Image: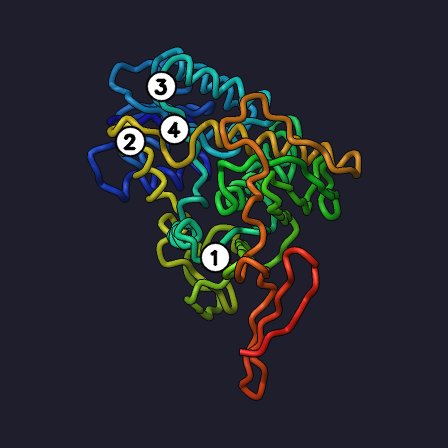
Amino acid sequence: MKIAMLGSGFIARFYADSLIGQRRIDTLHAVYSRNVEKAKQFASDYKLPLYSDNMDEVVNHPEIDLVVISLPNDLHLAAVEACAKAGKHVLCTKPLGRTAAEAKQMLDMVEQTGVMGGYLEDLCYTPKFSKSLASVKGGSLGRILWAKSREAHPGPHSNWFWNKEQSGGGAIVDLGCHCIEITRNYIGKDIRPVSVMCWAATQVHPIDAEDNAIGMIKYANGAMAQFEVSWCFRGGMDLRDEVMGTEGTIWINNFLRTGFDMFTTGQGDGYVAEKAESKTGWLFPVGDEVNELGYNHMFTDMFEAIEQQRSPFETFYDGYIVNAIIDAAYASAKSGQWEDVQIEDWRGATGDDNAERFRSFDEEYYLIKEEILPHGDRKLILKNKNTGEVIVKDL
């Protein structure tokens, strides 16, 4: 397939580095930018034959098979509409929309025209996440009770991020979309998000949107998700995930401490890793950034989904659900109350899925805990299913 890139900025270059680095049969062929000089420079840097400041011209070019959207949030809807009208498969960067209403429009457009809508949520494709999710799905952690994701850094790189009208919000819409979808995967995409409680504040930057937020999401099966996001964290980019289940726990540090430590007085070109604040002292470079952040695996899944005529791992529907949860988070931050997640078209399981909430020891007792004491004795703490009595049994 021949690919058109809409956008020529920071994320477009990350995507292009991944697409070029893959060296597969799918090739980056054209670029659109609102600034024709930037389009020209991008085309020169990546050796593309076509560039333009006319989006329709690029999207409708007969050689283009697939379009990647790496534009500011307020331009996603128009770009998806152009792709749907042209009958071109479209992959859109996160968040899908500024609101759930925008995301739903985009979802409807691709489904009505029959093109594939892939949601470019790279952090759901990182090697660590993929391996941890396989363990969760394989039952290693039992029933998932709680999942937490944190993303924090010193703030975005482009001016439009700081404009609430263009971006749709602040740290919640920018970083929370990652955290929400990560925890949603761990708990299960089939489980309905029910309500959100969120605190948000503008603590450091002179902007209208929030630069810090913490939120909790209730799911229909009783599981809880938590997100922590900040544009005020100093020291690089902090990406951490935690998952707790009835049979185990996972803790992941994705980016801040990479296992690659370097000290420098500041000589050289200075780039260390995304959101690194300094080029001197002890630094933590990333060996293969586009791979560690999931871009390679993400695009491979998207292209194979088109070839195999299946849905990708992250779809426009996933993007819509994430936007619906974000809407509830903003409503909660304003009201100070739990706010319901409004979903027009829920496609997952119904009911609370809590039939197996407690683990049985036998027909008479639930197992509360099995414990080994310091002197080696083993004990069981059991609860009678009928009387409620809690007993201790020596093994």
Residue 72's place in the image compared with 186, above or below, is above
Q: Residue at x 66, y 70 (%)?
A: 391
Quadrant in the rendering for residue 370: bottom right
Dot 1 falls on a residue whose secondary structure is loop
Q: Which residue of the protein is positioned furthest toward the left in this rendering?
A: 25
Distance CA(mark 2)–CA(mark 1): 41 Å
Asked if the residue under mark 2 is in contact with the one under mark 4, i.e. CB atoms within 8 Å, the reply is: no
* Category of crowding for the residue at label 1, using alpha-carbon neighbours closer than 10 angstroms: few (below 14), some (14–19), many (at least 20): some
Label at residue 250: none
**Horizontal side of residue 304 vs 193, given as left or right:** left
Residue 289: x percent and y percent? 39, 52
Identified by mark 3, the residue type is Val
Distance CA(mark 1)–CA(mark 3): 37 Å
Dot 3 falls on a residue whose secondary structure is loop
Read off the residue under disc 1: 141
Q: Residue at x 64, y 41 (%)?
A: 218
Q: Earlier in the sequence, mark 2 or mark 1?
A: 2
Read off the residue under disc 4: 68
Q: Earlier in the sequence, mark 4 or mark 2?
A: 2
Read off the residue under disc 3: 115
Read off the residue under disc 2: 28
